Image (cartoon, rainbow, N blue to C red):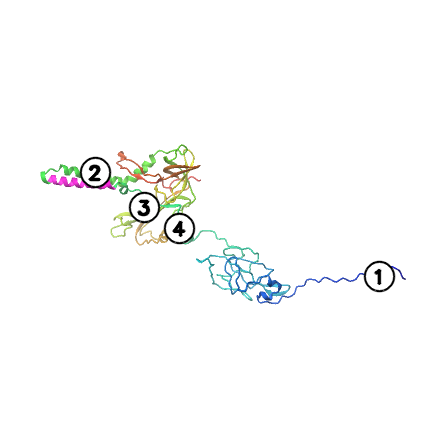
Amino acid sequence: MGSRFPSHQLSSGLYVSGRPEQPKEKTPTMSSVAMPYTGGDIKKSGELGKMFVTPADGSRSRKSGPINSNAPMRTGSFSGATSHSGQLNSGNRMTSGGAPGYVSLKKTNSGPLNKHGEPMKKSSGPQAGGGNVSSRQNSGPIPPILPTTGLITSGPLNSAGAPRKVSGPLDSTGSIKLQNYSVVNNQAVTRINQCDEYSFRKSFPKTIFWSIILLFLMGFIAGGFILGAVHNPILLVVVVVLFAVVCVVFTWNTCYGRKAIIGFISQYPDAELRTAKDGQFVKVSGVVTCGNVPLESSFQKVSRCVYTVTSLYEYRGWDSKSANPEHRRFSWGLRMLERHVSDFYISDFQSGLRALVKTGYGARVTPYVEESIVVDIDQSNRDMSPEFVRWLAERNLSSDDRIMRLKEGYIKEGSTVSVMGVVRRNDNVLMIVPPPEPLSTGCQWSKCILPASLEGIVLRCEDSSKIDVIPV
């Protein structure tokens, strides 16, 4: 049966009009081809290797840490780049399209630098890896293969591949010692020497002292001459009595001068910061808080302090060693003194205002802070205080067979303190600074106390270990 219209039969048996469609070419499908083993040579890696062509001189740009020139750099496009300061196993066997191949991870190490600015190289411990292992700088055991995330970390890694966090107490002979050293040697911390504390012999004017000695010498000579010439002992007796009185007064001031000064500070009237004028000398009593550089006591490790003092005394017998050149027999002598103070704040009890006390950066300070006996060491209990032995070892001090006593005092944050100084108002900042001239206590005739000079800012605080501290 014929027709003008062409038709054709489908595979199902139906007749349809039109000519049958010509078969189209099928688009080629992607198939994975087994990549041959290249041995790490980029030139044999085909088109992919051209992306990572390096200069002929073999120089490579590094982002962090050294890369061994002997270690071949092989970068897999499926793995990405991984960089950390731990250890990596470069013998990771990876496959692509069912064919085995070796793809090592690109490493970038980070760590401490030497004095020339180059990373320090460390190599110790066993190394593991399969196939072609690239050169690595590592130390200790090698952790398992880490996932290639591209995250750059610093520091040692734990078994899970994350940076290891170090917390808890530090080594007493290592990090804590360096930390205390850095705080103590900070410019913001004032170190008070033994010569800065009050002493009647040092504070008494030398000119007046030698003038008195000269007058008594002349009196003894004149009294002796009159006694020998006219046999009249009156002048000699008067000179001896006056000399005895002067010796008693000097001895009294030497022994009780410090207590008299503390009484003078306690009786000095408190001023109100709200009404204090710029440049006025005032005494302020209130609660202290730490400034930018809090301190820590040397032996008891009391933190958040504004003032610390630790003193080591030794008792000298007849044939024992002296603690210092001025140490007399059968007395206690100072062997070592650590005393530090930094800037702090004080809140006035009367007005409630807060002022910055400038006692740091080498300011002149006269402290009157009570100390308490912490350790008493003799032959019977020498081995009962390992902390004291460690404290001596940190300062290269020998114990031997000496009788020692350790005292410590501090002003902890929240303690009640009396401060004497000059008020300074700078914009909206209220400060107490050292006075330009020393403060004279004057003669206390009722107590037979001669005048004394107080230099710099005066700090007065009772033993902080025996009083309650106000939380701030």
Q: Quadrant of residue 92?
A: bottom right
Q: Secondary structure at mark 3?
A: helix
Q: Nearer the viewer, mark 1 or mark 3?
A: 1
Q: Nearer the viewer, mark 4 or mark 2?
A: 4
Is most of the magenta stretch helix, strand or loop?
A: helix
Residue at mark 1 to residue at mark 3: CA–CA distance: 120 Å
Residue to which mark 4 is pinned: 181
Residue 284 visible to the viewer: yes
Residue to which mark 2 is pinned: 245
Let me know if residue 225 is in the magenta part: yes
Q: Secondary structure at mark 2?
A: helix
Residue at mark 4 to residue at mark 3: CA–CA distance: 20 Å
Front-lying residue, 439 or 463: 439
Using a 10 Å C-alpha cutoff, classify the residue at mark 3 as few (fewer than 14 neighbours), some (14 to 19) or many (20 or more): few
Residue to which mark 3 is pinned: 194
Which range is magenta? Answer: 206-227
Cβ atoms at labels 2 and 1 below 8 Å apart: no
In the picture as drawn, the residue positioned furthest to the right comes out as: 1
Cβ atoms at labels 2 and 3 below 8 Å apart: no
Give the x, y percent position of residue 214: 19, 41
Residue to which mark 1 is pinned: 8
Give the x, y percent position of residue 26: 73, 62
Sequence-wise, the earlier of marks 4 and 2 is 4
Front-lying residue, 390 or 460: 460
Q: Amino acid at mark 4?
A: Tyr
Q: Nearer the viewer, mark 2 or mark 3?
A: 3
